Image (cartoon, grey):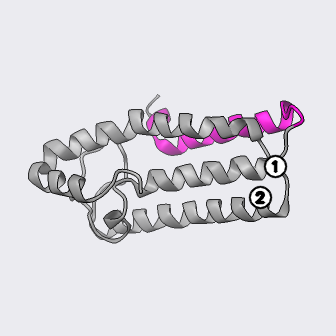
Amino acid sequence: MRWINIPPVWLAGFVLLAWLQARHLPMGLSLESGLTDLLSGFLIGGGILIAVMAVVEFRRHKTTVVPHQTPDALVQSGIYKRSRNPIYVGDVLIFAGLVLRFDAVLSLLLIPVFVWVLERRFILPEEDRLRRTFRADFARYERKTRRWI
């Protein structure tokens, strides 16, 4: 069951729900247009780019990217100057882009639910771990850098 406790599994689950909704329960709703396709591409591409930038920064600092492990370093450089959780920002952008790509209008309601799941299941426990591990350094970082964007 440990495999379910990682964000990509939750992202895949929410993506599957959106795809199923679009395929089997469209309810006559549609946002289909060239502009929607363009926006979905920007969201997906931007989400991937942000997540990759974040992982590269973790690797540069030789610390873990696994959410429930204690990190060896407090990463505050690169994309982490703008967001304390850029990988999760990337996940949300990817999900929102795929919802638009699937034309899953009802699944737009799942975006805030996905954000809530990420925050409760991953972000809050991670920040507690960082607070205990890096104490004053994390307190300063938390004051100067927003959680999302």
Residue displayed at 23% across by 39% down: 128
Mark 1: few, some, or many residues within 10 Å (few <14, many ≥20)? some
Q: CA distance from mark 1 to mark 2?
A: 7 Å
Q: Which residue appears at 49% of the width and 33% of the height?
A: 4
Residue 111 lies, in percent from the top left, at 59, 40
**Residue range highlighted in magenta:** 4-28
Magenta part, dominant SS: helix
Residue highlighted by disc 1: 31
User: In the drawing, does residue 2 fall left or right of residue 11?
Assistant: left
Q: Nearer the viewer, residue 96 or 65?
A: 96
Amino acid type, residue under disc 2 in the picture:
Thr
Label 1's element? loop
- Badge 2 local density, few (<14 within 10 Å), some, or many (20+)? some
Residue at (35%, 68%) from the top-left corner?
Answer: 57
Q: Could one spot residue 66 in this view of the protein?
A: yes
Residue marked by disc 2: 36
